[in-house]
Each structure stands twice: as structure tokens, then as C-alpha cells.
Amino acid sequence: MSSARSTRASNALDRLKERSGNRLYSMSRTGNGHFFLTAGPGQPPLCPPLELDDFVAFVNAQGPQKPQRISKLDQAFEQQLTKKPTAGK
């Protein structure tokens, strides 16, 4: 079970490194299974020790976010939703 936990946290960390361009981010795990993030080796923690779900949510919120991809159909649908009704109807 602990390896699955570490893999999920590691994947979140890898995504953060890719988004931010900072390869020095690192993750540590405490003896009781909590995780925390640092900006690099020897740096102070950027968050208190967190449970896995909270840690992944924290890491995902850090750094620049990737813009959501929107298909042409979704874009056309959004435009229809925001169209104002015509005066004759």
C-alpha cells in the first residue's frame, strides 16, 4: 500500500516540476506516512506534513497551471449559451 501512496505523490511532484521548470522540488515522507514539499534539498518545507490526498491537492495547486483544452464543439456550445435572445422573439 505504501508504494502506491508514494507513486501517487511522486507523480504529482513530477507534474509540478514539469509545469514550473524547477527540477529542484523534492518531497519527503515522515515516519507516520505524511508528506511535505520543499523547493530543493536543504530548503525549509513549503507546507506542513500532509496526508496523501491533501499533499497531492497542495502540489497540484502550486506553480503555473496548464490551460484547459477546449474542442471546437465545446467552444461553439459555449457561444450558443452566451448568445442574447433576439428582439423579435
Image (cartoon, rainbow, N blue to C red):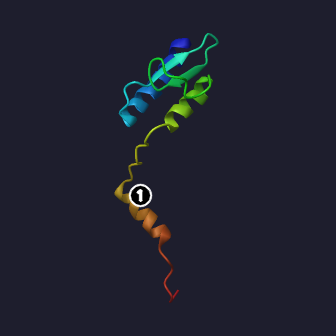
Location of residue 50 (image quadrant): top right
Q: Which residue lies furthest to the top in this view?
A: 31
Return the x and y of residue 21 as percentages of the image width and height: 35, 33
- Residue 33 at x, y percent in the picture: 61, 15
Say left or right for 28 vs 31. left
Left or right position of 20 against 43? left
Residues 37 and 13: in front is 37
Residue 29 percent across, percent down from the top left: 55, 15
Say above or below: 4 vs 54. Answer: above
**Classed neighbour count for the residue bearing mark 1: other residues with Cα under 10 Å, few (<14), some (14–19), many (≥20):** few
Taking the spot 60% from the left edge, 30% from the top edge, the residue there is 54
- Residue sitting at x 40%, y 24%: 24
Location of residue 13 with respect to 65 vertically, above or below: above
Q: What residue type is labelled 1?
A: Asp
- Taking 73 as reference, is 82 left or right? right
The residue most toward the right is 32
Q: Quadrant of the N terminus?
A: top right
Q: Which residue is drawn at 55% across and 24% down?
A: 45
Q: Name the residue under label 1.
A: 74
Q: Nearer the viewer, residue 52 or 79?
A: 52
Give the image quarter of residue 78.
bottom left
Q: Please state if 29 lies on the left or on the right of 64 as rendered.
A: right
